[in-house]
Image (cartoon, grey):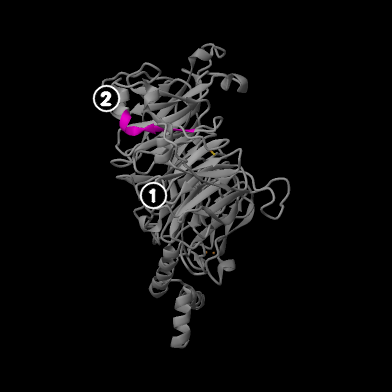
Amino acid sequence: MSKNIDKAQIEQGNAPENADRRSFFGKSAILGAGAVAAPMTAAMFATMAKAKASEAANSPVVHPGELDEYYGFWSGGHSGEVRIMGVPSMRELMRIPVFNIDSATGWGLTDESKRIKGESAHLLAGDSHHPHMSMTDGRYNGKYVFINDKANSRVARIRCDVMKTDKIITVPNIQAVHGLRVQKVPYTKYVICNGEFEIPMNNDGKASLEDVSTYRSLFNVIDAETMEVSFQVMVDGNLDNTDADYDGKYFASTCYNSEMGMNLGEMISAERDHVVVFSLARCEAAVKAGKFKTYNGNNVPVLDGRKGSSLTRYIPVPKSPHGMNTSPNGKYFVANGKLSPTVSIIAIEKLDDLFSDKIKPRDAIVGEPELGLGPLHTAFDNKGNAYTTLFLDSQIAKWNVEDAIAAYGGKKVNYLRQKLDVHYQPGHNHTSAGETRDADGKWLISLCKFSKDRFLPVGPLRPENDQLIDISGDEMKLVHDGPTFAEPHDCMMVHRSKVKTKKLWTRDDPIFAETLAIAKKDGVDPMTQNKVIRDGNKVRVYMTSIAPNYGMSEFKVKLGNEVTVIVTNLDQVEDVTHGFCVTNHGVQMEIGPQATASITFIADKPGVQWYYCNWFCHALHMEMRGRMLVEA
Ligand code: RUQ
Ligand code: CUA
């Protein structure tokens, strides 16, 4: 390769990496082992420089080999997963299985993932809604992403160093977790989320099921580190979405159905519903003082925050509000009208007075701009503007917050800046870093529920349409249509400088610590030994993998044995992942470089059963297989 070609290729970004990759495959095909590091520094630098240049121009074009400026975390809706998107290219970078089952990674199949799923491991479905990253002082800290499963009342945590789910809990005493956010300041000690559907307290089928006066909806406060529910707060109405302030003092949730109706007509009969504001200090003090009850046989403290409680305040807003969004300057909560064409602006600085009863609840409202039909969610830039999705109008309204407040105060100002057509029926929207102090006013994503004529037709079921909008200038400009599968409810964008991921697993990773503890009990060092342990009807098979070989090309079991295969991937090469798949057994998993993974199944078929590596790892990947010999 000549110097000139080298330089051109470096400028293109990825050529030297490819060259290394190619020579790696070539070399290890001959050597039969892949212990070759993949140096990529020159290419990385060139790529970074290029990406920097496109940042300056706010161009949505990311050339092949260039890197995106933002990590986007997208909920996968009723697919139950989370996806990582590159923004602004809108390339899907990775999928993180969470509440779903995934055959590529073995999520929901492996012993490690089943342990993480815990008591809900038997559930095969989920409905993920709101991914939000942990923060320190109101800025993303790159540690965790939290996401809720509305369908099964669960909350999960994704570890951002490896981009894998590491905790899943089922929240007790509630049904359907909807809105989820994190405490922003001083740091994410708590994850907050709303129990949406009201149920009897207790919900044990013993008391009258018809008497809706016993039905409650609970606000949930979860410890971000232990992932245990610290406390819950009982409210009036149905909780919907939520957000936190930038002072570490208040959380606010929208509530619809303050009527406690059990059908649509009843749910929307009253003209007003409300926003509930929670005082964190008062709630914590009440828990400490033991002023709580417990329900359904568990010991989670449930505080009474219904109307009249000192823990909460109820601010009336037009009926059926939906989204709740805090402005990144920390001054306002914005509740989105949904059935009303308005959003309600709550001044956070007035909340102290509201809690000490110096003002009336409605006095905390400082603006109620009329934006259009079906306002659902609002995002913010760094110039005092807000962007609200209008579901019914299929538009995004850009408006100025201070002007809207001035207009509410009686001034003749036009707070509306622009309305942009989106395609079609947007739900959530999100600006780059817009739920943090780092809001930068560069990009806006509109998550459209319908795509109709925007893409080649693919049958009656259509993709959603995630649209990328450049908001760096005075006008919003639509720059990209992105088809996505069901259903990105919500997303967030974090600057890539905040996220540091590992290239290889480290051997002390807690995700497989329990598996290693079992190995230790068996007296096996999984890094060096290939061994079969027979334990009554149970068989544990420890094997290593290094491209293109398993440490064991055969092992013997008896028909009906419960077999656990524990594979340790000895490869130290970035991107060399192995798989383990047993034909005809529904057994599949991923083993990342330097990881240990295990999977348990019944050997219920006699004879020769081949296992093979299902993650492409080597020129001799097809040959990476072995036999499980099942004696009848
Ligand atoms: S919330 S748009 Cu609006 Cu879960 Cu989905
Ligand atoms: Cu190992 Cu494919």
Closest to the camera, between mark 1 and mark 2, is 1
CA gap, disc 1 to disc 2?
Answer: 35 Å
Residue 27 sits inside the magenta stretch: no
Which residue appears at 59% of the width and 67% of the height? Answer: 622
The residue wearing badge 1 is 382
Question: What is the x, y in percent for residue 381?
Answer: 42, 48
Residue lying at the far bottom in this picture: please name it.
2
Q: Residues within 10 Å of mark 1 (few under 14, many from 20)?
A: some
Between 207 and 489, the one nearer to me in the picture? 489
- Whether residue 186 can be seen here: yes
244 to 8, vertically: above or below: above
Per the rendered image, the range of residues in magenta is 343-350
The residue wearing badge 2 is 285
Between 280 and 603, the one nearer to me in the picture? 280
* Marks 1,2: beta carbons within 8 A: no
Which residue type does callout 2 highlight?
Answer: Ala
Residue lying at the far front in this picture: please name it.
412
Which residue type does callout 1 highlight?
Answer: Asn
